[in-house]
Structure formats: C-alpha cells, structure tokens
Amino acid sequence: MYRKLILDNGIRLVTERIPTLKSVTIGIWVDVGSRDEVPVEAGYSHFIEHMFFKGTTTRSATDISKEIDGLGGEINAFTTRETTTFYVKVLDQHLPQALDLLSDLFLRSRLEKKEIEKEKQVIREEIRMVQDDPEDLVQDLHTKLVMGRHPLSRPILGKESTIAQITRQDLLRYIDTHYRPERIVIAVAGNFDQLKLEATVAHMFAKYGHTSRALPSKRSPPNIYCGVTMKQKPLEQVHLCVGLPGVAAGHKDRYAVYALNSVLGGSVSSRLFQEIREKRGLSYSIYSFLSGYSDGGTITIYAGTQAREVERVLDLIYREIRKLARQGIDSTELKRTKDQMKGGLMLSLESSHSRMNKLAKDELIAGAHTTLEDMLKEIDAVTEQQISRVAQDSFISKRIALTALGPITSRQGHALSARYG
C-alpha cells in the first residue's frame, strides 16, 4: 500500500508497505547531483556522499561499519547527475536501529578536516580507476561530446584539481545551499508498521530545516550535439560510443523509447547483439542504453572491437539505426519486446530495495506514484506506429555522435571523421 506524507518542514515521506517481505529499505534522496555544481564545485555532490560515512557526533566510521554488520544489513550511497542517495536495507525487525543509523549519518556527520584530507586521496584514486577502465572512460568522453558545455557533461566524480581545493567550509556551504527540506524525499519500502514509521521519521527530521527562502532551480534543458571525437590510447581494443537523442525521464513517449532501445541493443536478442556478436563475432560487448534526465535524454550504443574492425562494426550499427528509422518493427517483434519488458519490470520490483528506488524516482520526476499495473498498461499501449515515429525522431544521421577510444591511427581517425562526422 502506497502512502505519501509531507512533514511540516517540507520533507516528503513516500512509503509502500509490502507485508509479504521480510526486509525493509529506507532511502534518503536529495534532489541535487553533479549537474547542480558550478565548475569550481565539480565533484562536491559525490564528495559529500563519501563524507557522510566518515563519522557523526555519536558514531565513528568504524562504529557505523560494525553496527550495520551486526544487523546483517547493507548501508550505502550513490551520486548521479541529478540526485544524491543514502540508503540502508535490513530485516524488518531491525528497522528502528536502521532508521537511527541512517538519520544519524544524514543529520549529524562531523565532516572533520582530517577526514576530508584523507578522502581527497580516495576520490583521486577513484578518478584514476575510471581512467584505467576504457569502457567507463569512453562513456565519460562521449557524454562531454553530446552534452557540450552543459553541466550534465561533467563527470560525477569531478576533477582532481577541484577535489584538491575542497575545504570543510566549501562542503558546509554546498550542503546549506542544496540540502534543503523541499528537495529531500525519504522513501521506505518493505514490511513495517505505518503509523510507527511515520511518527519516528517525523520526530527524527522535525528540526531539519532552513530559515532562509528556498532558492529556485537553476537547471536548464540540455542541447544534444552530434560530431566525432577520438582519443588515442594504447589498448587492446577500440571502444566506441554512438549517441542519439533520447527523451526525458517523464516524457510521454518513454515506454516507446524503452521498447526501441530493447530492440536495438538492450538485450541478448536485440538486433545489434545478434548481428555484431552472434553472427559475426566482431565484439564481445555490444549494447545500447538510455540516459533519461528530468529535462532531456540520450540513447547510447557501446561496442568494443579490434582496430581493424572499427569501420565494419560502425557500418553495421549505422545500418541497424537506418533500418529501424525506415522500417520500424513488426508485430511479432513488438509482442516479444513487450513480454520481455513486462517480465523484466516485474522481476526487478521483487525486492524492497528496487521498490524504494521506484518510490523516490516517481516522486522526484512526477510528484506522484505510478503503480505496477499502470506501467504494464503503458507498455501494452505502445504501438508499431509509435515506435516508428520515435525512431524517425531519434535516428537521424545528421544528429549522430561518435566517440572512439583506443589504438586509432591518424589515418584511420581522419577516415572516421570524414565518413561519420
């Protein structure tokens, strides 16, 4: 059963009670991510996520680790381009302790100077780890290409230069600016007593607030750019990203775009996987994925292949893109895709953690809850004509972006730019 409660200070509590589960997951979501940083703050959102685990006024970092292990639970956090999330998952009987622990992290972290200095090195190593992972690196390079100078183009981890300059006052100022009650959603899913939960959360967060006026959002929709960018690096493979315009997370055509992505490269039965990996053995890893933000989105195709096969792989990718734009899909492929989507959706929502994620995203994107039944109806309502239309809108050759990373020669680079630019 779904319920929504808005606390006196503006914090939203959204819950879904599922008595058949033995677990409960609590997430505190803040509507702030890397896109909300100015250039000199690059990486602040992610850095704060790390720092909240480095000790509170009542618990050390070691105490936090021992306490969650003693409950047999999981506590973690993650930062995206639009949100920062802290969550804990435990057996339902441990909900009071879990709430106390998570709220302590969020409300009373010390942000000690010595811990900030230590964490700078940890973040530097995390940035370098991305640099050593070509699949992650090419996707970061590709995001910079398609998003241009928009804040969404910047890496979530930030840059070593900005991380090195962070001070405690910088973090406190950033938290005071962005961690405002009206931008916070607490999402809880699993087995719990509704009235006790609401009373506990209201008591724990009653004093959290700001006396100053709420600041308007400075977010602006991104433009999606095309073009070609290449970076030479001594690797065993060339890593490729092909980018196309997508839709925002709450767009009316999103289910048609989900279906289109599934057909293109979102599964092992997809056209790209079958054509490039299964039939020709040109790539081990080939897939497509969607990036949907509050005000825009992209479709990205990734492939890794030998340098001598780059043009062949790209030709096959572009061929499938053109074919979908011109011919769409038939009724048999649409039925299989719908069944796959519905099955994947229902399986993905079997855990309290995934239900918690959905609750929070629904609230942040639409301000309302979408039931599983509503989502299944939306999938069933997708038509061949709708998929054909969104394919024609997105799969336009003049709007395609290409990023390549690996052992590319200058001659090959010029040829790729001339052919696909």
Image (cartoon, rainbow, N blue to C red):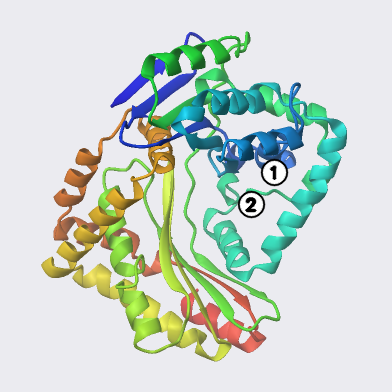
Task: Name the disc covering residue 382, or none.
Answer: none
Q: Residue at x 15, y 63 (%)?
A: 335
Above or below, 115 relative to 262: above
Q: Is residue 178 visible?
A: no
Task: Name the disc covering residue 155, or none.
Answer: 2
In the rendered image, which quarter is residue 99 located in?
top right
Compare marks 1 and 2 and give the one earlier in the sequence. 1
Q: Residue at x 42, y 60 (%)?
A: 289
Which amino acid, mark 2? Pro
Of the 4 image quadrants, the one containing the N terminus is top left
Q: Position of residue 226 (x, y in %)?
A: 48, 63
Residue nearest the viewer, comparing 411 with 268: 268
Judged from the image, the secondary structure of the residue bearing numbered disc 2 is loop
Q: Which residue is mark 1?
A: 43
Q: Position of residue 340 (x, y in %)?
A: 25, 60
Above or below, 69 relative to 309: above
Judged from the image, the secondary structure of the residue bearing numbered disc 1 is loop
Farthest right residue in view: 114
16 relative position to 312: left or right: left
Above or below, 228 relative to 24: below
Q: Position of residue 216 (x, y in %)?
A: 54, 22
Above or below, 313 relative to 379: below
Number of numbered callouts drawn: 2
Q: Residue at x 17, y 44 (%)?
A: 377
Which amino acid, mark 1? Gly
Q: CA distance from mark 1 to mark 2?
A: 8 Å
Q: Residue at x 35, y 76 (%)?
A: 272
